[in-house]
Image: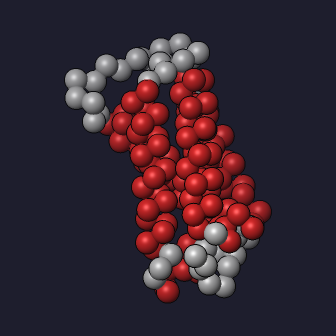
Amino acid sequence: MNSPGFLKGSAIGYMCLIFFLSSIPGKTLTPIFELSADKLIHLAEYWGLGFLLLRWWSGTTLGQKRIRLYLVVLLFGMFFAFVDETWQGFIPGRSKDPLDFLADTTGIIISILIFHFASHFGSLQKWIRPNQSSATS
């Protein structure tokens, strides 16, 4: 489960799942309060994506410097969220919502923060950063 191919396949498969779910026509929701279940779903969805990208890329040369890893995951996650939100604008009954993009970005940031702090605990290092013997700064 920690092989580079499995980690890569998990991240790519998850991105395909996000696009598949974004392609399902639906009703445009107009929440009364902006922190609706929809925003929490976006946050959780992109937390998962961020975590999978961090696990995949932490075992590559990209993961040799944490700050570079975190920045690339954040920028890629934001790019993917932007493309996903733009795509939803073309789906009947769906809309391109800047607040969804903000929730997506927040999910990526939370995944980076959790990954960063969890990687400092010895018992979690091998699971969080599977392709490295120790975490490097």
Residue farthest toward the top in the current orientation of the protein: 92
Q: Quadrant of residue 103?
A: top left
Number of dots carrying numbers: 0
Q: As rendered, which of 24 and 47 lies closer to the eye? A: 47
Q: Quadrant of residue 68?
A: bottom right
Give the vertical position of 91 relative to 69 (above or below).
above
Q: Quadrant of residue 56?
A: bottom right
Query: What residue is drawn where x is 69% and y is 75%?
Result: 131
Q: Position of residue 129 (x, y in %)?
A: 61, 74
For residue 25, side relative to residue 30 (left or right): right
For the question of whether residue 46 can be seen, the reply is yes
Give the vertical position of 3 relative to 71 (above or below).
below
Query: What residue is drawn where x is 49% and y is 50%?
Result: 108
Query: What residue is drawn where x is 28% and y is 24%?
Result: 31
For the question of whether residue 41 can be seen, the reply is no
Q: As rendered, which of 46 and 16 lies closer to the eye? A: 46
Give the vertical position of 29 relative to 133 (above or below).
above
Q: Position of residue 1 (x, y in %)?
A: 67, 70
Q: Position of residue 125 (x, y in %)?
A: 54, 80
For residue 42, side relative to residue 32 (left or right): right
Q: As rendered, which of 133 and 90 lies closer to the eye? A: 133
Tell me the quadrant of the picture where the C terminus can be found: bottom right
Query: What residue is drawn where x is 46% and y is 41%?
Result: 104
